[in-house]
Amino acid sequence: MTTSTSFDAPLAAISNSLTQLRGDVGALVDAASRHPTAQRRAALVDVHHQLRLLGQRVNAALGSPPAQDPSPHEPSE
């Protein structure tokens, strides 16, 4: 049986990490914009690739039909 805690705890950690990641990526993009070089562009391409892979994984999960939540009157397994 999967409890909401086994989902909620990682979700909270991921949410915090994504907030930090947005700031870090923003700083990286700003630095690359101020002083563009081939090396910085390659780094941004790598970051973009990694983010796309994460997005594809989440999109694949979203494509699955959601499971029905048990009725509040039914006993949990």
Image (cartoon, grey):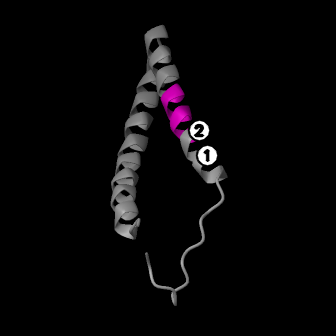
In magenta, the rendered stretch is 48-56
For image coordinates 35% across by 47% down, the residue present is 17
* Residue 12 occupies quadrant: bottom left
Where residue 56 appears, as percent x and y from the top left, is: 59, 38
Give the crowd class for mark 1: few <14, some 14-19, many >=20 residues within 10 Å: few
Residue that label 1 marks: 59
Which residue occupies the extreme top position in the image? Answer: 38
Q: Amino acid at mark 2?
A: Gln
Does dot 1 land on a helix, a strand or a loop?
Answer: helix
Task: Name the residue rendered at 35%, 62% in the picture.
Answer: 6
Counting the numbered discs, the total is 2
Q: Residues within 10 Å of mark 2 (few under 14, many from 20)?
A: few
Relative height, residue 67 to residue 43 (above, below): below
Q: Is residue 1 magenta?
A: no
Q: Are marks 1 and 2 in contact (CB under 8 Å)?
A: yes
Q: Can you give x and y, in whole percent of width and height, for residue 33 in the image?
A: 49, 24
Residue that numbered label 2 is attached to:
56
Q: Amino acid at mark 1?
A: Asn
Q: Quadrant of the C terminus?
A: bottom left
Q: Residue at x 54, y 78 (%)?
A: 70
Residue 1 lies, in percent from the top left, at: 41, 67
Quick one: 13 or 61, which is closer to the camera?
Answer: 61
Q: Residue at x 51, y 34 (%)?
A: 51
Secondary structure under the numbered disc 2 in the rendered image: helix
